[in-house]
Image (cartoon, rainbow, N blue to C red):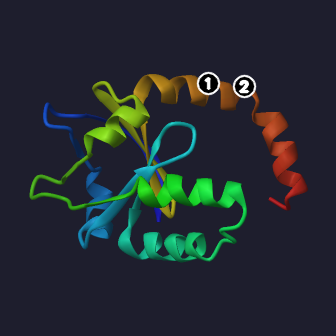
Amino acid sequence: MFIGEYSHNLDEKGRLAVPKKFRLDLAKGAIVTKGLDNCLFLYTKSEWQKLAEKLANLPFAQANTRAFARLMLAGAMDVEIDKQGRVMLPEYLRIFAGFKKEVIVAGLYSRLELWDSGKWNVYKKKTETESNKIAEQMAELGV
């Protein structure tokens, strides 16, 4: 289970240190892909397999399902953690997410989200401001 918020810097080669507490879970390899809200999603191989199967079984005759599957699957890349606990983030994904230097690693249970720190701070502030409204909508979903 991934939880928490961590700040790390990209190095000059585009490598990102994974928080130490998550490294063992990702040691057998991981998948990084384009996420929503211009962040990246980082999954363990087993969690990725579950998601990929669901995406592969979506009705491909619907344009929105094709578009979402393309975003997630075509944008994905296998990554491995090196001996220093870093993952190499492909350039096309760093560009997609608008990474500059500082990256926020946010644990969201079954995945990690990787955010440019500036975008994360704007998103977080907006979400915190609207938290009561969001909570009401979540209550409608049974949360």
Amino acid carrying mark 2 in the image: Thr
| Residue at 68% from the left image edge and 30% from the top image edge | 128
| Residue at 38% from the left image edge and 68% from the top image edge | 44
Label 1 with label 2: CB-CB less than 8 Å: yes
- Disc marking residue 138: none
The image quarter in which residue 95 lies: top left
Where disc 1 sits, the SS reads helix
Q: Is residue 114 left or right of residue 131?
A: left
Q: Is residue 69 left or right of residue 12?
A: right
Query: CA–CA distance between discs 1 and 2?
Result: 6 Å
Amino acid carrying mark 1 in the image: Lys
The image quarter in which residue 36 lies: top right
Q: Residue under circle 2? A: 129
Q: Residue under circle 1? A: 125
The residue most toward the front is 61
User: Where does the image place residue 93, in percent across and percent down from the top left?
Assistant: 35, 42
114 vs 1: above or below: above
88 vs 98: above or below: below
The residue most toward the left is 83
Categorize mark 2 by other alpha carbons within 10 Å: few (<14), some (14-19), many (20+): few
89 vs 98: above or below: below
User: Where does the image place residue 84, in percent across and percent down from the top left?
Assistant: 11, 52
Where disc 2 sits, the SS reads helix
- Number of numbered discs overlaid on the protein picture: 2
| Residue at 59% from the left image edge and 74% from the top image edge | 54
Q: Quadrant of the C terminus?
A: bottom right
User: Where does the image place residue 35, in percent across and percent down from the top left?
Assistant: 50, 47
User: Where does the image place residue 61, in percent across and percent down from the top left?
Assistant: 70, 67
